[in-house]
Image: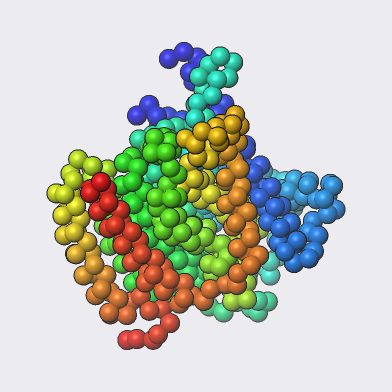
Amino acid sequence: MHDWVPILIMLGFATGFAAFNIGASKLIGPKHPTPEKLAPYECGMPPVGDARERHPVKFYLVAMIFLLFDIEVAFLYPWAMALRELRWVGFMQLIVFFAILLSGYVYVWRKGVLDWGRDRD
Amino acid sequence: MTSMGWLLPLVQILIVLNAVLIAVTYMVLLERKVIAWAQSRLGPMRVGPHGVLQPIADAIKLLLKEDITPARADKWLFTIAPIMSLVPALIAFAVIPFGGHARIFGRDVPLFIADVNVGLLYIVSITSIGVYGIILAGYASNSKYPLLASLRASAQLISYEVAITMMLVSVIVTAGTLSMVAIVEAQLHNHVWFVFVQPVALVVLFIGGLAETNRTPFDLAEAEQELTGGFHTEYSGMRFAMFFLAEYANMIVVSAVVTTLFFGGWLPPFPNVGWLAFLGWIPGWMWFLVKCFVFLYVFVWIRATLPRYRYDQLMRVGWKVLIPVALANLFVTAILKVWL
């Protein structure tokens, strides 16, 4: 745990730097707010409605498959460290793991989740 | 622990933070200059000779600008988002080994802040936090273009994250360790830089690095023609500057990681070749900085050269090209590791 103390100190310094700069510019900078200046930017037109509307479901799908794949990759870190001792046993485990991962990958690909341009239902 | 023992990390942290922030501001000048030269212009020339004081003028200007919080924005998240963007980019430098050990005033001083045994994992997880800053910025602005841009940016970041982490696993299998210092030492003991062992990993990692830092040709989140300015459209003054600093600090992180993993960090080229031994007289940290600079230049060079990808092309490259390549590379690496 001793190694992590400098990192924590650095975290404090970095946060302090960012917060200090933002605070300083708030104090120093001019303040002349007008309703137009505070309105959301929509190319000079009066803003229409709220920004937080419905968005394409594709973003949600990407986030979901990312979670699945990234968790699986996270399992590979300890495996990679232990491969030297595990030898062929570890390698066979990787084959099984990859087979499961690949079947999901092929399924996602065939379902068209990875095609961004094409419209699908 | 003596009082000096606590002083050393503090001095190191202050030096690294200041060096990184100065490097970031001058990176902006370098980029403007190189792109100007690529386009037969001169670039900034007015502030100082050949514009060398331009970054300082920019910093003062940004500090004195009016800091606007849009009326509909979520006030707290709007302020937290730039901090969440910048801080991970800065503290990632904690585990970057700028050099081995040096003798300063008769003391053995390590030229890195911390050598944690999970250094690479730390970098991956810390830099992933930057995505929160981007998505919070878009959400807190409550404006259409920033929200759309932040969705695009976060989808892009997480798509390339998978290929990058798989490639890092290949490097870990080769090196057999997660510590950044030990990875460089492994390259010393194997008598070869890992770029010759894992060339495919380097290419994928660098492409992924371009995408992770929102750089051309993957700067979809900042496509001016479609999205006005990207997720920071509503930001002004110092809070905008924080996003700007974060982007360039992330570029330096990617360069430093690529240098450490593939180009031997602080090692001189071919340390085991006898007639090249004179290169060892140049201090290690200088080798590190030179290698980093080469990659930073490549970043700018690519921006000056390549047009922007389309969004469906971007997603196709990430999911359908880089991930299969990464899987195949990991497979081959594992076979060779177990066999040999």
Relative to B119, is A18 on the left or the right? right
Residue at 23% x, 45% y: name it.
A83
Looking at the image, residue B114 lies above or below residue B227: above
Coordinates of residue A73 in the picture (x, y in percent): 29, 55
Where B311 falls versus B273 (above or below)? below
Quarter of the image with the C terminus of chain A is bottom left
Tell me if residue B94 can be seen.
no
- Return the x and y of residue B125 as percentages of the image width and height: 39, 48
Residue B144: x and y, percent?
A: 54, 73
Res B19 quadrant in image: top right
Query: Which of the two residues, B3 or B186, is positioned nearer the viewer here?
Result: B186
Please state the total of marks drawn on the protein image. 0
Say left or right for A56 vs B224.
Answer: left
Closest to the observer, A41 or B187: B187
Q: Residue at x 27, y 43 (%)?
A: A81
From the top left corner, tell me how far across and down residue B174 is, in percent.
Answer: 33, 46
Q: Is residue A121 visible?
A: yes
Residue drawn at x 47%, y 35% is: B272
Name the residue: 48% across, 41% down.
B264
What's the coloring here? Answer: rainbow
